[in-house]
Image (cartoon, grey):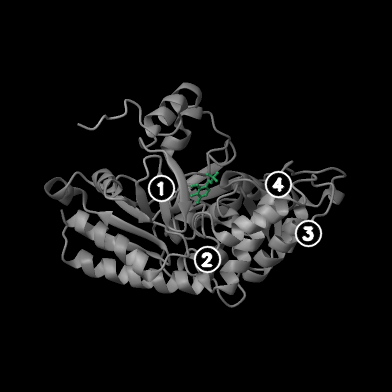
Amino acid sequence: MVDMPVHTKTTEIIDRHNQFMSINYARYPLAMVQGKGVTLEDAEGKQYLDLFAGFGGPLLGHCHEELVAAVTRQANKLWHVGNLFHTEPQTQVAEAIGRLGFGGRCFFCHSGADANEAALKLARLYGHVHPGPNGPRYRVVSTIDSFHGRSFGTMPTTGQPQVGQHFVPLPPGHVHVAFDDIVEIDRAMDEDTVAVIVEPIQGEAGVRVPSDNYLPALRQLCDERDCLLIFDEVWTGCGRTGRFFAHQHWLTNGQVPDIATLAKGIGGGLAVGVCCATPEVATLFDWHHYGHAVHATTLGGNCLSMAVAGQLLEVIERDHLINHAEALGTHAIDRLRRFARSVPAVRQVRGRGLFIGIELDAKAQGAWFGGVVDVVNRCMEQGLLINGTQGTTIRLAPALIISQDQLDQGLDLLEAIIQG
Ligand code: PLP
């Protein structure tokens, strides 16, 4: 008989974790130890095909060779000097975002919440410079089920009550309206309103894609009301949906937002947030106006994370990964929609590029399987990592370097598991 070890590596790691770590996350009883491309390996040596890479962080997969080389080169050169000095890696990233996006000016920080905080502060400044009849405008309209972060500035914009409910009172001046409903948003904007913040495709809500006229109509509405249009592209940015910014699917003919924010993928797995504003709006942060900084963060734009972000953008452009995401996404969505036609448990398949939601029918679930959680767990047992959100939707967001064979291999298994 084989002697079973009393403690596996995994339980050792989890035991130590449980003693010293904050328990704010509901984690799976797995410990990941290494990754390469779209494959992850746990502490027991089991391999997984990763179709939900690090909640959007490792956009080029795990340990991409060129990112490893870039961070290593930079680590031997310069890490951080503070934003009293100019450093080239920051400028290179900002130039690339300007070229791929809408020519905005970048403020670098560390997360999606951080980037949205900067956007909301720009909106406040705009409201002071362009007041309404009641004085400085401050109200921000966002959408129900949206997610914009968990900081005190962003919790009130997030349209999911459970995110802020234990932290009341939240800062006032926020209102939520239905996503993809231009009439409601028009109604909600009053003379104190200064900005609208929207995800071009709602991510945490279950990959909800708006109608084709929604973003252009928002642009028009914000122009008419002299309000800032902020697109939160923390999930959707950096090529994931088949455009550098997802809003580029719908805003054409020189139309741009006033601000777009990025995080998750732009750092390739390192902590990078970006608030990118048109030059007119970005000038509101200009310290010359105030004689001191009105917004700053110590480690924002540090050389190490900028070296990785710069290399990541270079690889995305050189290897045409945005087109790859679009083509592969179209293939996967078409395939899943064909599958859905013959499987009553699948209600709808949504998405753009490599950002895909598969909504399961709550009524059919009981008959077929235990729902999204059950599907996610069964996939994991068989070495496939996917995500579930809102209790009904499976989300796929693989790294942009995934091949069609790898993606199809994952979808074969997922479809087999959903079919039961
Ligand atoms: N905005 C969107 C659209 C998000 O999905 C998230 C996180 O999931 C955030 C902002 C917050 O990003 P972070 O967790 O990096 O603060």
Label 2 Cα crowd, 10 Å radius (few <14 / some 14-19 / many 20+): many
Location of residue 18 in the rendering, given as x and y in whole percent from the top left corner: 44, 25
Find out whether the residues at labels 1 and 3 contact each other: C-beta distance under 8 Å: no
Q: Amino acid at mark 3?
A: Glu
Q: Residues within 10 Å of mark 3 (few under 14, many from 20)?
A: few
Residue 162 visible (yes or no): yes
Q: Position of residue 336 (x, y in %)?
A: 27, 66
What is the secondary structure assignment of the residue under circle 3? helix
**Between marks 1 and 3, how big is the CA–CA gap?**
36 Å
Name which of mark 3 and mark 2 comes first in the sequence. Answer: 3
The mark closer to the camera, 3 or 2, is 3
Which mark sits nearer the N-terminus, 4 or 3?
3
Q: Which numbered disc, 4 or 3, marks the residue closer to the eye?
A: 3
The residue tagged 2 is 239
Q: Is residue 372 above or below residue 219?
A: above
Q: Quadrant of the N terminus?
A: top left
Sequence-first disc among 1 and 4: 1
In the rendered structure, find residue 97 and report the number of the disc placed on it: none
Helix, strand or loop status at disc 1: strand
The residue nearer to you, when weighing 405 against 157, is 405
Horizontally, residue 366 falls left or right of residue 15, namely left
Query: What is the C-alpha distance between the residues marked 1 and 2?
Result: 26 Å
Task: Say what secondary structure mark 2 lies in.
Answer: loop
Label 4, label 3: how far apart the Cα atoms are: 14 Å
Residue annotated with mark 4 = 300
Q: Residue furthest front?
A: 1
Amino acid at circle 4: Gly
From the viewer's perspective, is the residue at label 1 or at label 3 nearer?
1
The mark lying in front, picked from 1 and 4, is 1
Amino acid at dot 1: Glu
**In the image: residue 20, left or right of residue 396:** right
The residue drawn where x is 60% and y is 55% is: 68
